[in-house]
Amino acid sequence: MFASRQIFGSIQRRAFSASASNASKVVVLGAGGGIGQPLSLLLKLNPRVSELALFDIRGAPGVAADVGHINTKSNVKGYEPSKGEDQIKECLKGADIVLIPAGVPRKPGMTRDDLFNTNASIVRDLAKAAAENCPDANILIISNPVNSTVPITAEVFKKAGVYNPKRLFGVTTLDVVRASRFISQYKNTDPANESIVVVGGHSGETIVPLLSQSGYNLDGQALADYIKRVQFGGDEVVQAKGGAGSATLSMAMAGARFTESLLKAAQGQKGVIEPTFVDSPLYKESHGVTYFASNVELGPNGVEKIHPVGKITDHEQGLLDTCLKQLKGNIEKGEAFANQNV
Ligand code: NAD
Ligand code: LMR
């Protein structure tokens, strides 16, 4: 009798926690910045978010007060280090999802790798704080160079003994958003209905759009122009902003979309697939490439299934070969930094 009551109680608790899992605490580290502000706005509009915690070295309480007036249910709080050492701890405590757009953006003439010296240590320190205060949260890395900052974060979590490869994501959604938008401009279709697979990493030639998989065909120069535009879409924005930073608004949309997908999957929806840069077996043995972006099915435990690249054309295979060579160097650079500096 006692045993059956115990079992019943535990089932009840589980049932409660299953519905309580709809309550999601989402954290933005770097919330005062160009991406952080519109991203916080979009997250405040998402009914799946119950608590929004915003941190930045400056400005997060102001952003929190501002979006906090929006008439959706979630509670918003801003944190900044000048208010005390515990701020980051409090901010991260109980987090389900931590988005990291903290760091410097590019100026014209720079590559994403040129950001490494500044952003590597920013991401390392924030990853350390996450590993200490919310080791089970999903960590979404936006700060560039993503090809290196994701491996840095993994090494920090490994050193803290809490690494779970299913919970670490490099956000590459913007590449897919661009690939879909740009093809719609060639084909005169509704971009909302387009979904172009993009694999590899997140910088220049490591970004590999697989147009053939969506049944599209572009010829000669049109194909070359399309691929270049997807691979260097970030540069287009950097140049247009003329020194005032890189993509912020489209990135906020992409980050909010990825978060929504993760929340839907965590809350039980099946078949949620997003491309993302994760600890991946796909090219580990063949090329020594330990992280790779491909379509990933998301679930309550984060990564549910990593989809292989699938059938591609010879031309796409050539792009992939170039990608894998560069990616390996980017990943090793991140790991070497972490090994010396964590
Ligand atoms: P930004 O300079 O406008 O904002 C960055 C914010 O980070 C600032 O508010 C700054 O105060 C904050 N910050 C710096 N160090 C911090 C720390 N230690 N703790 C907390 N906050 C800190 O830059 P942005 O335009 O928002 O871009 C941010 C990063 O995102 C850049 O590295 C950029 O290259 C990258 N990015 C990535 C993608 C992608 O697709 N993954 C797209 C666009 C931009
Ligand atoms: C992008 O793709 O827009 C970002 O990675 C920012 C950049 O530096 O291009």
Image: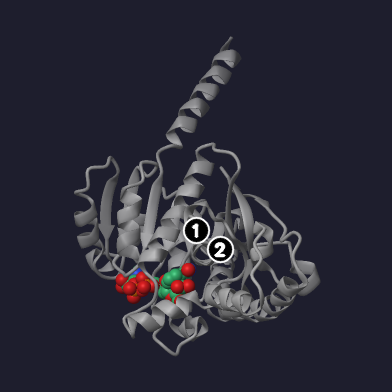
Instruction: Examine the image and state in which quarter residue 319 appears.
Output: bottom right
Residue 33 locus on image (x, y percent): 31, 69
Cβ atoms at labels 2 and 1 below 8 Å apart? yes
Q: Is residue 6 visible?
A: yes
* Residue that appears at 44% across and 90% down: 109
Quadrant that contains the N terminus: top right
Q: How is the image coloured?
A: one colour
Residue behind mark 1: 139
Q: In this orientation, which residue lies closer to the viewer: 243 or 312?
A: 312
* Residue that appears at 39% across and 70% down: 102
Q: Is residue 92 above or below residue 112?
A: above
Identified by mark 1, the residue type is Ile
Residue 201 locus on image (x, y percent): 60, 71
* Residue that appears at 46% across and 88% down: 110
Q: Is residue 304 above or below residue 105?
A: above
Position of 16 with respect to 286 (left or right) is left
Position of 143 with respect to 2 (left or right) is left
Callout 2: 10 Å neighbours few (<14), some, many (20+)?
A: many
Residue 157's tag is 2
Callout 1: 10 Å neighbours few (<14), some, many (20+)?
A: many
Between the residue at mark 2 and the residue at mark 1, the CA separation in whole angstroms equals 11 Å
SS label for mark 1 = strand
Q: Residue furthest right?
A: 286
